[in-house]
Structures are given as structure tokens and as C-alpha cells.
Amino acid sequence: MAEKSTPETTTGANDVPIPGAPAVEPPAVEERTEPQSPLPPKPDQDAPETVSPTGTPTGAQKSANSQSGAYLTTAQGVRLYETDHSLKAGPRGPSLLQDHHLREKIMHFDHERIPERVVHARGAGAHGVFVANGAAAGVTKAGFLAAGVETPVFTRFSTVVGSRGSADAVRDTRGFATKFYTDEGTFDLVGNNIPVFFIQDGIKFPDIVHAAKPHPDREIPQAQSAHDTFWDFVSLHTEAQAHVMWQMSDRGIPRSFRTMEGFGIHTFRLQNAAGETTLVKFHWKPKQGIHSLVWEEAQLINGADPDFHRRDLADAIEAGAFPEWELGIQTFPDTPDEMFEGIDLLDPTKIVPEELAPVQTIGTLTLNANPTNFFAETEQVAFHPGHLVPGIDVTNDPLLQARLFSYLDTQLSRLGGPNFAQIPINRPHAPVNDMFRDGMHQSAVHGGVAPYRPNSLDGGCPFLAGEDMSAYIEVPQELPASMKLRESPASFDDHFSQARLFFRSLTPVEQEHVAQAYTFELGKCYEENVRIRQLQALANIDGELCAKVAEGLGLPAPAPTSTREDDVQPSPALSQLGKSWPLAGRVVGIIADDNSDQDAVATAREAIHASGMVPLIIAPKGGKLSGGLTVQRTYLTARSVEFDAILVAGSAAPGADAAAGRDAKAGDPTGHSAVDPRVSMMLAEAYRHAKVIGGWNHVAHALAAAGIPEEAPGVVIGDGPAVLEGIAELLAKHRVWERFPVSA
Ligand code: HDD
């Protein structure tokens, strides 16, 4: 068996010495087709040392690949004296073909865009590190999951349906893809924020995507599922119902990428050093908490700040508030039927409730660096569920099997050829010695003459690893005697019980949001037949939900056509409510003006900052408040959606009403002038979206103008910044849930 290689000193080919390398005796000619010690890879076959642990080019590589030198040059490095005027026959004459700089500059610009991803086109990424705690070491030999091992990673979050320039806060599934640059090669975990998928067999993927994308005639609506073709598909292919139920829940509109769970969805097969196998499902759990937007808020965000999620991730990392997730696994015995508690582990539309198989934490991901260049890194990163390392393998899930083909294939057209693994963000941090040569955008200068094996000319290199250190080891599995056929197993036929399980695990307020989401989306469909068919699916899932949606649509609620199992056990782990979450990173707006008690504003700002939250002062105009504090938002640039809580800093003057929020133009010293309508709107929206509202000193006027009763839940009024304590307690629950009405 071959051992791991050590640095090599000859090229092998014709034994030409490498400059600067110590000489090594080549093996005798007759021994060259067998591994000797074995011979290590040639220098150009090593992992590029000039790539930093996070994949960013550094040092020599950087100067070769990116901008260097002080002078403007052509692409050939020739210095230029002018770049603003093309070469013309006289000041008013035509441009000359001879102008190389003009042609080269325009040619390059013309080709700056590459095709966007056919799905998941809109995304944001970050570098980070994964530290394993060793809990998985018993079930997998994967080196990066051994205790204490640190692995550089790159994570890209995305929406699925929208184009590259679409808005962030749409109702959609989110992608959660992580590239682990391990010492044993690259492992990609390409998951979503929803643990079940639309379809059971990858052959339907083009169909569901065609149905979800904008209509082909008018190319609308953008990044939306609220349209006829989507609901036509999911009501005809009822296997999609569990996924759609998640999408219609608050999970479909996450507050931030930082507050989403992630799931590997498929069942994977792990193998330990003894060759024993275990089936697992991967879970990412955010330490920031699991939080969502509310629908009206999401819609406002898409107008006010279409880059909401992208900005949030980059800002948090830049501010040093590094988001963290725990990676966990649910483990199942690798039995021949690949079932667990009656749930088919090969069906990607099914979860195994955590109450039946607890999630064990196996390591922590921290995202700690923003990309240097969006295109080079976030746009060009290429994930693939088939990028596996020793100890992690796929299963026969028919969705996963189709993915194994699709991701390689798509990069050919997206990244322009077969050498996309050489793009810095995609380069493994392990040595690469693959015998692949040439092709579009080849950037390696391969030495040697024998990219095949065995060979006797390049010292026999490369050598085969032993099975103990290799990936893609097939675990011998007996396949049931069968015909070649296009069929799913009978266990794939249950399309409704998991949608019901999820719905019944939610609290009443979450269920209300689900009912509203279905009513909104189906209300946007033109075809009544589509609405009726989807109502039929809902009738088969849950009678009450169906009745509510039917009522909202003004249609009769149909009777179920399949037996409705009323005995599903709710899984409390699926609800986002009832937990207390950290405050770090929550954004608190303080509405203040020059009449506000300046000391109180300063104290509040300090206290909010000290608790890890982000205080932003909102004032009538930019610059500084009379007390010297810098204004971060004005009434013009602020919108309620940016804040998790809003505080009104009232005037210190006894007898005066709210100073902050008064119309500055009115300038009424009695304090009874009209509240600026933008402030009333901000407070009214925050109130409607169940956000915490507070204030001190004299704020009754501002609250009254927004129609907010002082005694309403989640409204904290005090004499000074002492109100902050009450606010912190409320924010830990994310929203003032009792403020949402729940219809009977
Ligand atoms: Fe996929 C991209 C996740 C099923 C075909 N997929 C893509 C991305 C994510 C997922 C997160 C974006 C990666 C990035 O940030 O670059 N896809 C999933 C999950 C699935 C899934 C969790 C089911 C469990 N996908 C799936 C199927 C197929 C594809 C069944 C095709 C048979 N997916 C693709 C693709 C994409 C892609 C066309 C587009 C861009 C890319 O691959 O690199 O190949």
C-alpha cells in the first residue's frame, strides 16, 4: 500500500533537476512502474502554496494574478499615458481601428459577465473556519472531523428562484453551501435552510425550476412563488407539499442568513476506520437564534433595501460580530432497508424528528472574513455534493444521485470549461495530482511527460492511495433483485403526513402566518383550477388550515380525498418560538433630536452597545445631535424594517411632550406640534411587525400619533434608559408574539 507522499525533488521526466532542490537518486528503471517510497508529486502538482488558508491569493500569486505596479498598463503590461480619449482622425473625426487600448478595454468589458447560476443565482458568501469537537470520530474517519482539527471554509448563502440582481427578502428557500478545504481534499456540504426538498427524484428538477421561475412569456414575476405555474406544479406533484408548507411558514422569510438553520437534507453514509458505516443527516444550528421576518416587513424591505441579507452578513462580519453555527448529525443504523422508525431515509421529502433522533454537535463554524472580491470568490465558487472526503459517502437517494451529475456539468458553461477547480476560491488546499491536462483556461504549467499510469517515464508518479486513505470507497451493498424500471418505492407515496407533522408542530401564531401565506400566494394566481387543486392538497393535510385559506380565497373548502392521519406526533423542535436567544447583533434604533435628553441618549447608546447590540441614532437631519452624538440615520433614510426595536428619546423638559419625532419645521416650543409623519410611520410599522418599542421621559405624544396604546404588550416606557432592561428581555424572544392576532 502506498504511503502519503513527501516533497519531491526531481521532475521524473528525463530526471531534469529542479532548480534549488536537493538531488535525489531516481529509482532503477525496472522499478519505476511500481511505487517506491512512493515518489512525491512534482512541484507543480503540489497545492498552490501561494493561496492563503481562505483561498485568497497572496504574495507572489497575488502580484501575478491581480493588480500590481503603480502605472496604468494594457493587459500586456505596457504602460499607458492616456485612457480617456480614443485615437481619432482629428478631434471631430472617426475612431481608428489601430487603437489597441480602446479595442482591448472594450473587448474585456464586453465579456465581464458570466452566465448566472441557473438556480441560486443571488447569493452572498464569507470565509471562515470550522473546528471539530471530535464527537463524530467514532462514526467517520474523515480527518477534519477529528477533535480539535481546524479547517478553512467558504460558505455561500443564496435564494433559489431569483436572478442575480433580485431582492433578498423574498419568500423562498435559502441555499446554505459550505466548502471545507480539508487536508484530505475538499468536502462540500450543499444544503438548504429547509430540511425537505420539493421533489423525490432529480429527473423532475428542471420541471420544478421551470415552474418556479418567471413565466416564459412576460418573464414575470421575479423571485416569487406567488404565481400560477408554481402552484400548478406543486398541486399536481403533491410530493412537494411538505417543502411548500415550510416555505409558507416563517422559515421562507429569514430575518438574516445569520439566523437560519441549515440542512444537508439527504441521508449520507459515514464510514469509520474499522470500515463500519452509519447513516446520517447533517444540521447547522445558528448560535444567533432562528429568526424570521414577517411578510409585510419582508415586502417593505425588498423596496427599501433589496440587499438586506447581503448587507447584514457583510456588516456583521466587518463589525467583528462573527456568526457561528454548530454542525450536528442525526445518526441512524445502516440497515438494509435504510428506514428509521418507519421513515424512508432515502426520501428527501421526509425529516426524522429530532425527538426520535437527537442532533449531536460535531463542530462549530465561524464566518470571520468577507470576500475581497465578490466576483472572484462568491460568484466563481463552485460547489458539488459529490465533493467528498474519505469517511463520507452518498446514498442511493434518487435526488442526490441526479445532483452528482448536475453540479459538475453546470460549471462547464458557467465557469467556461473544465479547469474551474484551478480558480483560487475552488482550489483544494490538499495536493492535487489528477492527470487532467489542457482545456480552456488551463492555468497550471504541468511538467513531466506521462500524465497516465502506470508509467515508467515520470517515475511512476502519481501513485494510488490505499483504500484506508481514499474517498469514494463503495461499501458493498446487496441490491434487491429487480428489473430495470422507472419507479419509486411505495414508501415514497406518502405526500401529506410530513406537511401535517410540520404544521401541527407550530404554535398558533406561526400557524396563522402559514394560513396567511397560502392565502396571499394563491390569491395571486389567476387560474381558479390551480387554487382549487391546492386547496384539495391542504384538505388532505389539515382541515382547519384548508378551511382558513379557503375562507380567505372565497372558495369552498373541499373534503379530504386521502385518509388524514390525525395521529402525527408534533415535533416541538420545529417551532421557532418559545426559546430565548442571544442579543448580540440585534439592531436598536433611537429616535432623538436636539431637544431630547442628550445624556439619556448617550447612556442608552452605551448600554445597548455594551450588550452586543447595534445602536443607531435616528434624527431629523444628519451630522451630530446637540449633545455631540453622531447621527447614523435620518428620518429620510431610516425605515422601521432595519430595526429589531425602536426607542424614542423624549425631552427632559418637565411638562413637554415627546421632543423626538416632532416635526422640526413646526418648531412648536409647547411640544404639541405634529409628530413627523415619517416617525409615526416608523413606529406604527414596528408596532404592526410585533417589534419592541420603548421610550423615556415624555413620549406619549409620539406613540399616540402612531396609534400605539402605551399599555400594549412589548411597549416599555420609563423615566430614563432603565427601560433597556425590559427591552432586552423582550428582544431575547425576538418579537412580541402576543401582538399578532390569531383568528379562530
Ligand atoms: Fe442544487 C446549485 C442546494 C437539488 C442542480 N443547489 C445549488 C446551490 C445550493 C443547492 C445551495 C447553490 C450553490 C452555490 O452557492 O453555488 N440543490 C440544493 C439542495 C438540493 C438541490 C439542498 C436538494 C436536496 N440541485 C438539486 C437537484 C439538481 C440541482 C436535484 C439537479 C438535478 N443546484 C443544481 C445546479 C446548481 C445548483 C444547477 C446551480 C449552480 C450550481 O449548481 O453550481 O447544478
Image (spheres, grey):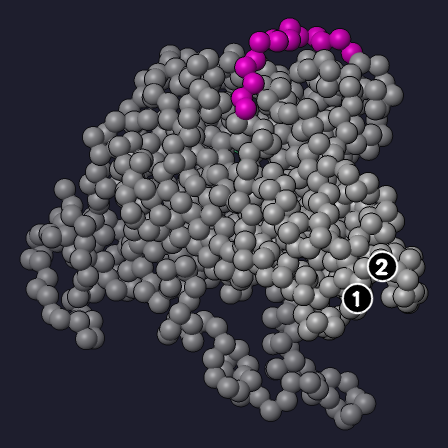
Q: Which residue lies at the image location 61% right of the left edge and 82% below the top edge?
A: 100
At 38% from the left edge and 63% from the top edge, which residue is drawn? 52
Amino acid type assigned to the residue bearing label 2 in the image: Ala
Residue furthest out toward the bottom = 90
Task: Give the vertical position of 736 relative to 616 (above or below).
Answer: above
Q: What segment carries the magenta color?
A: 558-572
Q: Report x, y in % for residue 584.
A: 54, 51
Give the number of the disc on residue 366: none
Above or below residue 320? Residue 236 is above
Residue 108 at what x, y percent from top left?
Answer: 60, 70
Left or right, 629 with respect to 699, comes to: left
Tell me the number on the disc at residue 656.
Answer: 2
**Quadrant containing the C terminus in the rendered view:** top right
Residue 489 vs residue 184: left or right?
Answer: right
Q: In the image, which is nearer the foreground, mark 1 or mark 2?
A: 2
The answer to whether mark 2 is within 8 Å of ligand 1 is no
Residues under numbered marks 1 and 2 in contact, where contact means CB atoms less than 8 Å apart: yes
Q: What secondary structure characterizes most of the magenta part?
A: loop
On whether ligand 1 comes within 8 Å of the CB at mark 1, the answer is no
The span from disc 1 to disc 2 (Cα, nearest Å) is: 10 Å
Where's residue 119, x and y in %? 61, 43
Examine the structure image and report whether residue 569 is included in the region drawn in magenta.
yes
Q: Does residue 563 appear left or right of residue 192 in this picture?
A: right
Residue 595 bears which disc, if any? Answer: 1
